[in-house]
């Protein structure tokens, strides 16, 4: 069985070292237009599902922590509880719309232009991890756990 590649596009020159090929172009060149469209569809579905999941998780978290004046109170909405009041659903949709307004412009910007945003988000992520580690360590030494063996001396760790 002989494997034949599809014909190369007329503008294809492998010796051009200034040209940068994208993955969908390589799919078209080496696998054909159908595989290129399949790759693009799979990539679209992946990005769409990932943004949907991320937005849903962030909105679920934010509705319980950030109250909306006149709509919800602090820690009132539990997305995983048995009852989800209509006010919480309105708050959830409001935060989804805010996330959409935040992420939509980013989708239309070149990747190279997002370098500063990515650096900022990385620094913010590491700062959040640092705050979590410091707050847990501080809680171990400052707040006695219920049922601790010796409530007089830190670290306060509850027995198993």
Image: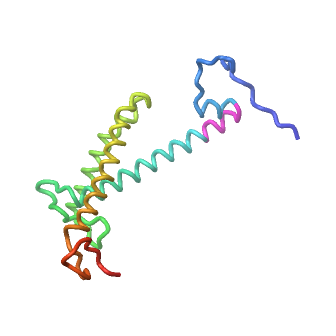
Q: Report the residue at 61% width, 30% height from top.
A: 25
Q: Position of residue 5 (x, y in %)?
A: 77, 32
Q: Position of residue 142 (x, y in %)?
A: 19, 67
Report x, y in % for residue 135. 25, 60
Hey, which residue is sitting farthest front in the picture?
153
Side (left or right) of 68 relative to 84:
left
Q: Nearer the viewer, residue 90 or 126?
A: 126
Report whether 140 appears left or right of 57. left
- Quarter residue 26 falls in: top right
Q: Residue at x 68, y 18 (%)?
A: 13
Magenta stretch prevailing secondary structure: helix
Q: Is residue 99 above or below residue 24?
A: below
Residue 17 higher or lower than 142, as above or below = above
- Residue 2 in picture, x, y percent from top left: 87, 37
At a point 66% along the width and 37% down the height, the residue shown is: 34
User: What is the quadrant of residue 140 in the picture?
Assistant: bottom left
Residue 24 sits in quarter = top right
| Image position of 37 (left or right of 110) | right
In magenta stretch: residue 35: yes
Quadrant position of the N terminus in the picture = top right
Left or right: where 112 falls relative to 64: right
Asked whether 68 or 138 is in front, the reply is 138
The stretch drawn in magenta includes residue 43: no
Please determine whether, in this image, residue 34 is positioned above or below residue 127: above
Observer-nearest residue: 10 or 125?
125
- Residue range corresponding to the magenta coloring: 30-38
């Amino acid at each position: 069985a002989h494997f034949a590649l599809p014909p190369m596009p007329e503008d294809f020159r492998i010796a051009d070292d200034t040209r940068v090929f994208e993955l969908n172009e390589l799919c078209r060149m080496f696998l054909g237009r159908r595989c290129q469209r399949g790759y693009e569809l799979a990539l679209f579905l992946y990005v769409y599902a990932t943004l949907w999941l991320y937005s849903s998780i962030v909105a679920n978290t934010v509705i319980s922590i950030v109250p909306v004046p006149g709509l919800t109170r602090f820690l009132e909405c539990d997305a995983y509880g048995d009852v989800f009041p209509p006010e919480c659903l309105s708050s959830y949709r409001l935060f989804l719309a805010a996330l959409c307004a935040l992420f939509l412009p980013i989708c239309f910007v070149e990747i190279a232009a997002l370098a500063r945003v990515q650096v900022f988000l990385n620094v913010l992520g590491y700062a959040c991890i640092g705050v979590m580690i410091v707050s847990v360590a501080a809680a171990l030494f400052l707040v006695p756990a219920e049922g601790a063996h010796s409530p007089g001396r830190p670290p306060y760790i509850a027995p198993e």
